[in-house]
Amino acid sequence: MSFVDRCSEKPLENIVVPNAVFGKNRTSMPQGCEHGVVVLKKAIAVEYGKSNIRINAVCAGVVRTEMAERLLKDNQSVEGAITALHPVGRPGTAEEVAETVICLSSGAASLVTGQAIVVDGGYLAQ
């Protein structure tokens, strides 16, 4: 089965950081790489759209994972600062990011392609 045949059966999603869609001081190298992923997704969406291939980038903000919990466990001031950055009052969960990917992969998002979907509790909306 060819790449096009395999990909036309279900959409392709990637998870990248929100830095991929905005600028920040002293992060040019990682931001350039993340932005490159977003632009590549857009190009692939245009190139393969007629083959029924949808591709999007999910830009996840701060997510409570095991690693994040270990880092924050002993530092309440950092946890409080991170929480304050989010208009929804908390960082996200891995399940919330996964739900976004599931939605984008479903027929409910059949017209969504070539997009960078930010899942960050409103952090970038400020």
Image: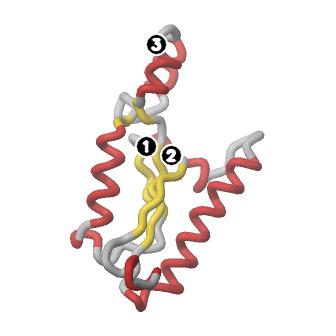
C-alpha separation, residue under disc 1 versus residue under disc 3: 21 Å
Label 2 SS: helix
Amino acid at the residue labelled 3: Lys
Q: Quadrant of residue 9?
A: bottom left
C-alpha separation, residue under disc 3 versus residue under disc 2: 25 Å
Amino acid at the residue labelled 2: Leu
Residue farthest to the front? 1
Q: Residue at x 43, y 43 (%)?
A: 120
Residue 92: image x %, image y %?
37, 36
Q: Residue at x 54, y 74 (%)?
A: 42
Label 3 SS: loop
Label 1 SS: loop
Question: Which residue matches tag 3?
Answer: 73
Disc sitting over residue 124 in the figure: 2
**Left or right side of 108 for 59:** right
Residue 7: image x %, image y %?
40, 77
Question: Which residue matches tag 1?
Answer: 120
103 relative to 1, above or below: above
Closer to the eye: label 1 or 3: 3
Q: Quadrant of residue 93?
A: top left
Relative depth, front residue between 124 and 101 = 101
Report crowding for label 2: few under 14, some 14 to 19, many 20 or more residues within 10 A (C-alpha).
some
Question: Looking at the figure, which quarter contains the N terminus?
Answer: bottom left
**Left or right side of 22 for 71:** left
C-alpha separation, residue under disc 2 versus residue under disc 1: 7 Å
Relative depth, front residue between 51 and 123 = 51
36 relative to 1, above or below: above
Q: Are marks 2 and 1 in contact (CB under 8 Å)?
A: yes
Relative depth, front residue between 123 and 101 = 101
